[in-house]
Amino acid sequence: MAWVLVSMTLRGLMLMVILLWTVTSTDGEDVHVTCVFSEDCVLPCSFQPDSEEVIHWLKPEDKDLTVHSYYYSTDQLKQQSQPYRGRTALFNDQIPKGNASLLLRGITLQDQGRYKCYTSTIKDNKESFVNRAVEAPVRLVDIQLSDDIITCSSTGIYPEHKLTWSTDPPSDLSFDPGTIQNSTSIKVDDRGLYDITSTKQFSRDRTNICTVTSGTVERTTTLKQQDPVQTSPSSELSILCSVSV
């Protein structure tokens, strides 16, 4: 808050003008935060500690949705937007130390976007921005064999991902993009997450490798046929394959 006193002489009269305005400082570049789908996540925000703290978390790109507000030394949630009700919290014991970070529980894809943290004290006002991305990393890659057809699948992934086949030792067929593309299907579930499934001919003389990548996370599963177990003619037995993740 700034006060300026201006004096001017006009036709022999002293005109006193007091100008009052609010100066809001803005931090530099946006902070980027990546949150994991369905888990809790913290958006960082700090300010210079002082008395009469006011904190507003808003989402400007969604018509300034009110995410969380705090003033008069307590949370003010009557105007909180519906998608955030029951999901937000400040670290109230840290506010006197200048911590205005926001905890958001149960992250969804709709929580992605740019957030504004507005803070005010008796001496200063400040705005900072946080860009939140959401990811659902690859957790499991499943591989199955049926009638010489090998199927690889993974579910609940975000953002867009990639499934690749390979073999050990390498074979030209396993790297044929056309063959892989024609046998791969991608679906979106009701949460907006991706399910991916791909099939190909089982390579009996090689280790079959399926790799699913999403963002910075990559997981691989392998399937190979083991050599037959030598038994007597009257008790023939063979072990078909083994799977490793």
Image (spheres, rainbow, N blue to C red):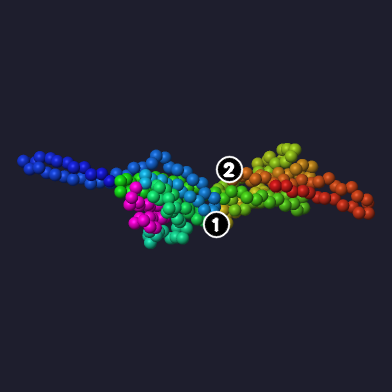
The span picked out in magenta is: 50-75
Give the CA separation, mark 2 to mark 1: 21 Å
The disc, 2 or 1, on the residue closer to the chain's N-terminal end is 1
What residue lies at 38% left-to-right and 61% top-to-bottom?
78
Frontmost residue, 103 versus 122: 122
Whether residue 45 appears in this view of the structure is yes
Frontmost residue, 163 versus 234: 234
Q: Are marks 2 and 1 in contact (CB under 8 Å)?
A: no
Q: Residue furthest bottom?
A: 78
Q: Position of residue 147 (x, y in %)?
A: 77, 53
Residue 31 placement: quadrant: top left
> Which label number is shown at residue 218?
none
Q: Position of residue 47 (x, y in %)?
A: 38, 45
At label 1, which amino acid type do we have?
Arg
Q: Is residue 182 left or right of residue 242?
A: left
Q: Is residue 38 left or right of residue 9?
A: right
Q: Position of residue 240 (x, y in %)?
A: 81, 50
User: Which residue does the numbered mark 2 point to in the structure image?
Assistant: 216
Frontmost residue, 174 versus 66: 66
Secondary structure of the residue carrying tag 1 is: loop
Sort mark 2 into few (<14), some (14-19) or many (20+) by Cα contacts within 10 Å.
few
Q: Position of residue 136 (x, y in %)?
A: 57, 50
Q: In the figure, 59 relative to 12: above or below?
A: below
Sort mark 1 into few (<14), some (14-19) or many (20+) by Cα contacts within 10 Å.
few
User: Which residue does the numbered mark 1 point to in the structure image?
Assistant: 191
Is residue 53 inside the magenta stretch? Answer: yes
